Amino acid sequence: MKYSKGQRVKHPGKPEWGLGQVLEDSSSTSVKVFFVGAGERQLSLSHVTLIPFSGKEAEHIVLDNLRPISDGPGIRYMSLPRAVERFLELFPQGFHGKKYTGQERDYKIKAHQMAQELISEAELKRLLAEGKYEEICRRALRVANATNLIFPNEKMALKDGLENPLARTDFATALYGLLYTPGSFKAGFDGFARVLGSIGANKWTTATYFPFIVHPDQYMFVKPTVTQKAAELSAFEINYRPELNWLTYESVLKFSNYLRSELAELKPRDMIDVQSFMWCIAPEI
């Protein structure tokens, strides 16, 4: 039987491998397939006849966003069950244990609570109406300094960029647009990214920190090395580019929501837990 590149299949003798995608047209003797539960496999067609799938049964978010598989040395694929094992090796009681809460969650929740007080929708609206742009910037910097998530040099770049009064006005307005303007989040993200670019602070950590801390139920924080490595381990294409862009962030959100859904048994509460899970399976070197 011949198999075509992109075809979705399952191995009849390996149900634990889950759904797979044919990576290249099969030869007369073998076929290369990426399985969600096992990674890449070269299979002899004399020993197995794969079962083709189509329609709803052939849908899987990882396969729909499968990153190109490298033939060279690099980070090896890690199935989600193995990733969960690695996480639980570090935190045996999972997201709700004392060790995890103390090391990974408490300080981020404190920053979230600070953000709710200092840069809430009501506070930003009031300060903007009063023209208190410098105060908004001061509060934003306090929230940024509440954790170690943004690199120190990037915090300094933001602080230096906000020395200019015109920059403060633009930043304060864009921050409100990013966090609270109803409608397209993309428009708010793009506007905030433009302002960060104009003041020399256009880094992924700075751009994604505020929505993550203010709305941890919806948005993900991007720390480039960790996020890229976690996505690579999961074979998930996040279309990463170092410059700020919506395609990358939208892809990161897809990846994050996939993890959150698949980790349901561990009961992640929000993207804070998902971001910590990424760090645990792909710690920054």
Image (spheres, rainbow, N blue to C red):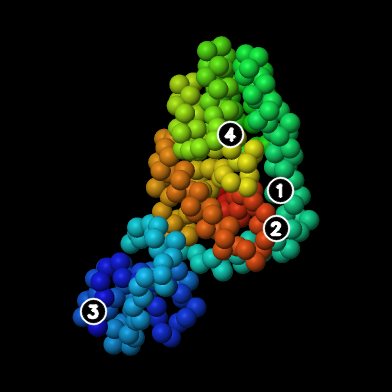
Q: Amino acid at mark 2?
A: Phe
Residue that carries the numbered disc 1 in the rendered image: 105
Q: Amino acid at mark 3?
A: Lys
- Whether residue 51 is visible, yes or no, is yes
Q: Residue furthest bottom?
A: 47
Kindly indicate whether the residue at mark 2 contacts the one at mark 4 (C-beta within 8 angstroms): no
The Cα–Cα distance between marks 3 and 1, rounded to whole angstroms, is: 50 Å
Marks 4, 2: nearer the viewer: 4
Q: Tell me residue 225's x, y (percent).
A: 50, 45
Q: Is residue 129 left or right of residue 56?
A: right
The Cα–Cα distance between marks 4 and 1, rounded to whole angstroms, is: 22 Å
> Along the polypeptide, which appears first: circle 2 or circle 1?
2
- Whether residue 153 is visible, yes or no, is no
Above or below, 122 against 98 in this view is: above
Above or below, 112 against 168 in this view is: below
* Disc number placed over residue 95 in the picture, else none: 2
Which element carries disc 1, helix, strand or loop?
A: helix
Q: Residue at x 73, y 63 (%)?
A: 93
Q: Residue 132: which quarter of the image?
A: top right
Crowding near pointer 4: few (<14 within 10 Å), some, many (20+)? many
> Along the polypeptide, which appears first: circle 4 or circle 2?
2
The Cα–Cα distance between marks 4 and 2, rounded to whole angstroms, is: 27 Å
Q: Amino acid at mark 4?
A: Leu
The Cα–Cα distance between marks 2 and 1, rounded to whole angstroms, is: 9 Å
Residue that carries the numbered disc 4 in the rendered image: 179
